[in-house]
Amino acid sequence: MTPFELLEPTSLHEAIGLLDPDDPTVRPIAGGTALMLMMKAGVFRPTRLVSLRNLGDQFARIAVGADGHLNIGAMTPLAQVERSSEVARFAPVIPRAMRRLSNIRVRNVATVGGNLAHGDPHMDLPPVLIALAAEVAVAGPDGERNIAVEDLFAGYFETVLAKNELIAALRIPPQGRRRAAYLKVTTGSADDWPALGVAVALEADRSSVKSARVVVSAATEKAMRLEAAEQVLAGATPDDATLRRAGDAAAETVECIADVRGSAAYKRELIRVHVARAARQALNGATH
């Protein structure tokens, strides 16, 4: 690695001030699990890294706010989210998904904010959070703004964040009667990068699906909702025929990418099968 400057601000305001929106070699660093790999491979050669480790405990807290939202600080390690009783009660699909997210060494260091800001379409957390209608609080020199997680990703390893903006917190709304599931398909070990990730959140009874959110990742250039599948599910009887139609609609409308984990055609067939399976798991209450 080439030499670089490491700065360690003690406030969010100071950290934002150290970021240069016009210099792509200046980056914030949280857990660093992804960024350090890029640096070792020579893909990224920073001149300055702004460490977020000393911003304060308020950015690593998990709590339910007065409005009923679950608030998770951006510097909260993934392992802490995985073990949190508050998260397990509020949205048990999250800790279930965490168990196959990389390995415990990574989860002990990687943070919620860094995971989302990295923009990697193979990450397991973004599709789950999109299915739960989560949003992020983003801080910048002009103040704070909220962005729905589904609107955070602009493309392959791209987000809508400005280079001098930082994710401060993740907010998940009350789920009510909504139940959710996440399925991960890997071509290697169980905790490998996925060839496909599918998250489904449904509110339904025996007679009809009241609402549906269906999200795909890894097979596409970014985590994204599958509106065609959602339209099939919404208002329909939640039987096997409906779930198959939702899988077919997803496969026929999604644009897949090819990579070392499979061709676009292979991933499209994975989507066809696993959208229906994830919906069935959500309906059966495996997670919510």
Image: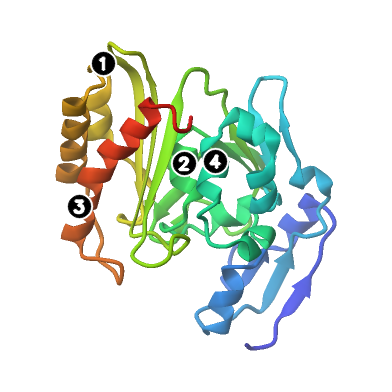
Secondary element under disc 4, as helix, strand or loop, is: helix
Residues under numbered marks 4 and 2 in contact, where contact means CB atoms less than 8 Å apart: yes
Q: CA distance from mark 1 to mark 2?
A: 22 Å
Q: Which mark is residue 88?
A: none
Q: CA distance from mark 3 to mark 2?
A: 19 Å
Tell me the mark number nearer the camera, choosing from 1 and 4. Answer: 4
Q: Earlier in the sequence, mark 4 or mark 3?
A: 4
User: Quick one: quadrant of the N terminus?
Assistant: bottom right
Task: Report crowding for label 4: few under 14, some 14 to 19, many 20 or more residues within 10 A (C-alpha).
Answer: many
In the picture of the structure, the residue carrying the numbered disc 4 is 94
In the picture of the structure, the residue carrying the numbered disc 2 is 128
Using the rendered view, name the quadrant where residue 258 is placed.
bottom left
Q: Is residue 173 above or below residue 107?
A: above
Question: At 42% from the left edge and 58% from the top edge, which residue is drawn?
Answer: 122
Q: Is residue 37 above or below residue 95?
A: below
Tell me the kind of residue under disc 1.
Answer: Gly
In the picture of the structure, the residue carrying the numbered disc 3 is 268
Relative image position of residue 161 (x, y in whole percent): 54, 52
Relative image position of residue 251 (x, y in whole percent): 18, 45
Tell me the kind of residue under disc 4.
Answer: Ile
In the picture of the structure, the residue carrying the numbered disc 1 is 235
Tell me the kind of residue under disc 2.
Answer: Val
Secondary element under disc 3, as helix, strand or loop, is: helix
Task: Report crowding for label 2: few under 14, some 14 to 19, many 20 or more residues within 10 A (C-alpha).
Answer: many
Q: Earlier in the sequence, mark 1 or mark 2?
A: 2
Relative image position of residue 192 (x, y in whole percent): 44, 64
Name the one closer to the observer, 135 or 207: 207
Q: Earlier in the sequence, mark 3 or mark 2?
A: 2
